[in-house]
Every structure is written in C-alpha cells, then in structure tokens.
Amino acid sequence: MNRRTFISVGATAIGVSTLPRFSIGKLREDEFSQLRVGCIGMGRMMYWHLNGFMQNCTVVAVCDLDTTRRESERDRVNAHYGNKECVAYNDYRELLNRDDIDVVVIATPDHWHATIVIEAAKAGKHIYCEKPLTHDIDESIRVIDAVKQSGVVLQTGSQQRGMKEFRIAADLVRNEVAGKVLEIKSDFWGPATPCALEEEAMEPGLDWNLWCGPAPYRPYNSALSPRGVYENFPMGWRHTIEYGGGGICDMGAHHLDIIQMALDKDASGPIQALPPTDGSQGYGAKLVYDGGLEVTREKGFQLDFICENGRIQVSRGMFHFELDGETKHKFLTREDGGSLIRAVTLTEREFLADVDMRFHHQKEGGHKQNFLDAIISGGQPVAHVEAGARSAICCHLMNLSYIHQQKIGWDPKQLKFTSGGKPEWMKGARRDYRNA
C-alpha cells in the first residue's frame, strides 16, 4: 500500500479506534496518568516533550527512523517507569494502529507534520504537533478539516504563546492600551531555499526512504538527519524548501503566530503577501491585513507594535512599553536594572487590571498542561488547530512571495488565492507527494 492509498483508505479501515479511549471531557484531573501517549520523531525537541509527558501521562510507544534514537528513547522511558512496556517503532503507522494510545506527540521535520496529523486524527488520537503545523497551504486547509471532523483535541507547539512577555504584549495590543496598531515590524530569519547538499555515505540503521517520505527523494546528507542521539537542534533540513520552510517557518512561525493572536486573527489572516521591493531574499517582505495594516520583516525586535499613542516591543527575554512618548516599563539588558518579570508584571498591574479581554494565564506545566486541560474540559487549547494552521499559512504566503518575487493575493475567509490564483502560486500551495 503506497502512502496516497493509505491516506484515502483512512485509519478506520485498518482497524483502529475512531475515537480516543478517553473521549473529550471524560477524564478527571486526577486521571492524567491513565492517558497513554505515543511519540513520533525522537530528536532534541522531543527529548524535552518526553520529559513533560512522562511526568503527567503514561508513554507507551516511541517512533523514529533512526535505530539508535528510538531505542535510546525507549530505554529512557522504560527506566523512568521501571518497566519494559514502551515499544519502539520504525514506521509511525504501526504506532497509530494501536487502539490503546490516546495521545500522539509529533516532532518530526516539517514535511511529515500534516500527513501524520491527518492520519492521527482519523485514528482518533488527541494530537500535540510541533510548529509549523503544515508544510504548505493546502495541508493547512486539510488539517483543519480533518481535526474538526474527528473531534480530537490538537495543540500546536507554539509555546511562545505561553511566554509572559509575549502574552502581555498581545494583551496590550488587543485592548488598544496604546491605541490602534498602525504598523508591525518583526525580525526573523529568511525564506527557504532548494536543498543543494552533496551526497554522503549512508550508515546502517536509518530508513532514509521513509525519512524523505512524501517529499522529494534525494541522496543522504547528515545535515538533514544527523545520526544517533544529539543535543542540538539540527538546522539542515529546516532551511530547505523540500523538507522545511526556512527561518520564516522556524522563528517566523512563532512571531507571526503572536501577531495573529494579538490581532484576533486566529480564524482569519492577511489578504496579501509582498516581496521586498529590491527583489532580494533579505528583509522587507510584508504581510498585509484588511484595512491596510502591514507586517514587515525588518531587523530589530522580534515583535514591534507601533500604535497611535505608543509602542510595544518584545523579544524573548526583552520588553519595552512606551505610552504617550514616555517609557513606562522596560527590560532590555541587566543594565536597565530590575528584571524582565518585574517589567512585565508591573505593566500588567498598571495597564491591564480592568481590561475586558485577557489571554490565558499559563499554569504550571505550560503548553503541555494547557493541552491536557483541553482534553479534560472539552474546550480548545491556546494554539488550537485553526490557530496553528492559519499561522502556518502566514509563513507559506510570505515564502511564496519570496519565491515568485510578486504580490500574492489571499482570501482568508474562503481560504483561496485572489487575483485569479496564478499557476505558479498554486504549485507552491500544494506540493507534489511522492509515494514513499
């Protein structure tokens, strides 16, 4: 059975449950440990996710295409529980075929995200998937449909939504504490480029054909999939069009996601993407929202909201709030005195105490706990499927504007291109799938 056939048949046809063992809203808080979890993609990001899920739930399966990684993480799970019940898989479909698994955690390279999410949703698993949720625009649309039809809970791994400096910045923007937003600037790395890595000798123990999966097959290079257990975050695949989405789908996915959140666009998005005016791959690309509000990729703060009466600037570990020409609170370096948490907390107390709308307060356990709470309550997590998929669309639109060096028109309500939808745009919006 090839990959395309597998998707069309669906998970139900091969005998898995169509609903989680613990349906939404059916689990008490003291029963977290009964949730059985399977993890797919055992790299460095999953190392940290695994630590968290082992503390709250019961991890029963791991999956990776590298023999050393999957066996190492299987052994780590079994050592944690003091048993030998965790099973290591090479093929994620074997893990999804287990009807005793309630939750799937996905931290593979980007080109596999949507495929596994869709199949996991069909199999009735609650899903935690790293950002960007998808690798192209068409996948975003299909992921939204699949998750909503299945009724499972999905949390996108946009952990930045829970970082207090970004949450308070979004609160200030949404409540117009400094007036309406006039312009937004955001600093993140650039677009994806075609993979040009040279072939290297393949060592045994890696299923390279399945690693490439639905994406184009190319000769092995260790920058794409370093062998064994590693303590860094491999960037080789992330920079490529074929397997990642460049810096736009890496840190850009975090920052554009906060912009979507702050502007109340989790169910909407921009109407245009514009390339830099100089025709380069550098700074200057824009997303344009209804009404003409522009988000420009520009060097500076990770997020810079320029408002009618002030300015809200935030980066990881940095915060600056200016109102009516006066700095109210800031923490940029230790030379400023105080601390980041003090600057953010004072801003919250002085300017957000009586506002109508506040974003969620991150509980102990963070983004993962927010996901587990949603499984219990039957509500939506903070980075639910539509939020994650539409933030990914923002990234894909900007990447397309760089690739084609032209204005890309988009209808966020109908989820389709405007201005006729030129063929070259459409090709970038749905990649060709290889039968792996």
Image: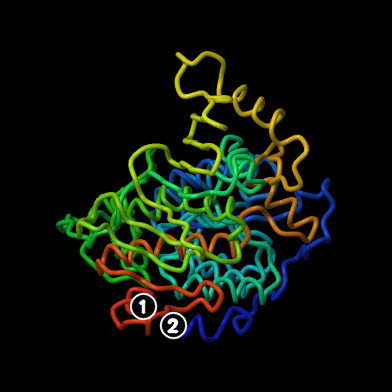
**What residue does disc 2 label?**
4
Horizontal arrangement in the rendering, residue 407 relative to residue 287 (left or right): left
Q: First in sequence: mark 1 or mark 2?
A: 2
Q: Nearer the viewer, residue 292 or 405?
A: 292
| Left or right: residue 220 compared with residue 321 | left
Q: CA distance from mark 1 to mark 2?
A: 8 Å
Image coords of residue 369 (percent x, y): 69, 45
Residue 317 in view (yes/no): yes
Which is more toward the observer, 78 or 146?
A: 146
Quarter of the image with the C terminus is bottom left
Q: What colouring style does the render use?
A: rainbow
Residue at image location 56% in from the left, 32% down from the top: 324
User: What residue lies at 64% left-to-right and 55% top-to-bottom?
Assistant: 37
Give, as a three-letter code, the residue at label 2.
Arg
Crowd class of label 2 (few under 14; some 14 to 19; many from 20; radius 10 Å): few
Looking at the image, residue 416 lies above or below residue 65: below
Tag 1: amino acid: Tyr
Mark 2: which secondary structure? Answer: helix
